[in-house]
Image (spheres, rainbow, N blue to C red):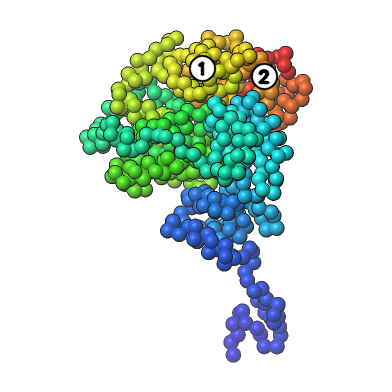
Amino acid sequence: MALDENTKTAGDGPKKGVWKSGKGKGRRHTKGRQLEDQAWDEVRALLDGKNRDRDLLIEHMHLIQDEYGHLSAAHIRALAEEMRLSMAEIYEVATFYAHFDVVKEGETPPPALTIRVCDSLSCELAGAQQLKAALEDGLDPAEVRVLRAPCMGRCDTAPVLELGHNHIDNATPEKVQAAIDAQDTHAHLPDYETYQAYAATGGYETFKDLRANGNWEEVQEKVLASGLRGLGGAGFPSGKKWGFVRANAGTRYLAVNGDEGEPGTFKDRWYLERTPHLFLEGMLIAAWAVEAEKAFIYMRDEYPAVLEILRREIAALEAAGIVEPGYIDLRRGAGAYICGEESAMIESIEGKRGMPRHRPPFVAQVGIFGKPTLVHNVETLHWVARICREGPEVLSSTEKNGRKGLRSYSVSGRVANPGMYLLPAGSTITDIIEACGGMASGHSFKAYQPGGPSSGLLPASMNDIPLDFDTLQPHGSFIGSAAVVVLSDHDSAKAAALNMLRFFEDESCGQCTPCRVGCEKAVKLMQKDSWDQGLLEELSTAMVDASICGLGQAAPNPIRLVMKHFPDEI
Ligand SMILES: Cc1cc2nc3c(=O)[nH]c(=O)nc-3n(C[C@H](O)[C@H](O)[C@H](O)COP(=O)(O)O)c2cc1C
Ligand code: SF4
Ligand code: FES
């Protein structure tokens, strides 16, 4: 009788390659972590009716995190099964983002309630550390955990924290306790202009006209004539990008950058919580101009109210027949500043870790799913709609200090009335402080951050520079997202720079050594009473020269500017 390779031979034991060594000794299941029926059922219930495409991984992890408060090993295993991914792939993505809590077997899940206390610069100036300590002392860690978190885009009402998804402005332990008692842990929606209200005043007529018989090049000319430049921070002339994207044949996409993570910046939220449809119409016009097959909106998870507004208003656009269902794809970030860098955002939209890509190729050529992608900041698109509706003069007719246009300054810190101020682009810090009603009582002006921590700190003596694109570079700074933080004689420039570097240390994606190790090393050196300036300068040079993206390249700005302008503090 012929014997099969994998069956026993008569009388002489198991044959080589047969894995069962004897009766009862074989494995009852395959190697590796097993699928648990209950966890699988739970994940399938959450994913019911949803597709399992790879790019939806982060969206699906949010569903589990929202429902169960963490991602257990059993749920990750079940998600891996459903999405046909390896557990390792899911694990590496989940652990990249601050808003996912991965809980392995045998570990204790986090308590039901999480408080995230912002400790970025404006909140730290307003007492975030003391607030966090008071909360840690006063609350039961088995019930509530208190975490530090980066800027939540509400710096004008610092200190700020997030209780569940409820943001508490000008936070105190008493306000927190009251919210816990009232189980007030959900986002509060502000009053905003709905689709009906926007459409009633001519909203979407421009877009409909353009779609029916518009010429994209004419629109591009208008946008160029207005002088609009990218308001995400890089300042690239907005219309020009459209031509670059259109130069590539085949499927194209548009991606909106709503990550707004640069500490001190809250202008995008300000517009979205008031007039979301100006942005949405601008987005549809830009998408039409590059013939985008789909428009993705990447919105930071720190803005739950905005996410809800967009869900509702996108549904209203679909119901009104302005867009096909699914044309606008809203994606939720998960707590990673680096995903504001456009190529990292695209990685994240694809469901991966938000690691910036090497360039070239640029995202206008190779973007989402390898297709040419037009990326715009939220506010840029807000202005695209206004330029198309009101003409390029809406920006170009304002002139001040030799600069043209308007700038949305997010102002916080030691001013009397922090807030979002739309001012001429040629405004100086003196004009901005004046617009804010002057300095806060008892404070005199000492220094300012002109455009996020990436722009560093300038002294009060440099109070006559127009805060616009190109005007700050000669001073070792730049306007970025126009996130202005004002410091007073009560504040230390050295401590502010340390706060900024801590932020970069936390948020570095870690893929390149000069940035990952450089930020960590800089923080260590900056914590000392006296700075080793030679070493810090050497480190700064290495970071600027050898980092892949703007985070690592700009992180030394606060160090260098404090060494230059505040030498007596270090
Ligand atoms: C570290 C880093 C973070 C960034 N964060 C944001 C952001 O939060 N929002 C944004 O719109 N652009 C951000 N940008 C700029 C984007 O890469 C990109 O230039 C922008 O979204 C393009 O849109 P715009 O031309 O309309 O400004 C960031 C860039 C870097 C290097
Ligand atoms: S510079 Fe920093 S954030 Fe940017 S890619 Fe390198 S490690 Fe990541
Ligand atoms: S919300 Fe705290 S610094 Fe922006």
Q: Residue placed farthest to the left in the image?
A: 213
Residue at (60, 32) in percent of width and height: 171
Q: Is residue 377 visible?
A: no
- When the figure is inspected, residue 453 is found, relative to residue 103, above or below; the finding is above
- When the figure is inspected, residue 231 is found, relative to residue 98, above or below; the finding is above
| Residue 136 picture location, percent across and down | 70, 39
Q: On residue 436, which mark appears? A: 1
> CA separation, marks 1 and 2?
19 Å
Residue at (33, 42) in percent of width and height: 317
Q: Total number of numbered labels?
A: 2
Residue at (63, 26) in percent of width and height: 126
Image check: 534 left or right of 295? Answer: right
Q: Which residue is mark 2?
A: 491
- When the figure is inspected, residue 133 is found, relative to residue 48, above or below; the finding is above
Q: Residues within 10 Å of mark 1 (few under 14, many from 20)?
A: many
Q: Amino acid at mark 1?
A: Cys
Q: Amino acid at mark 2?
A: Asp
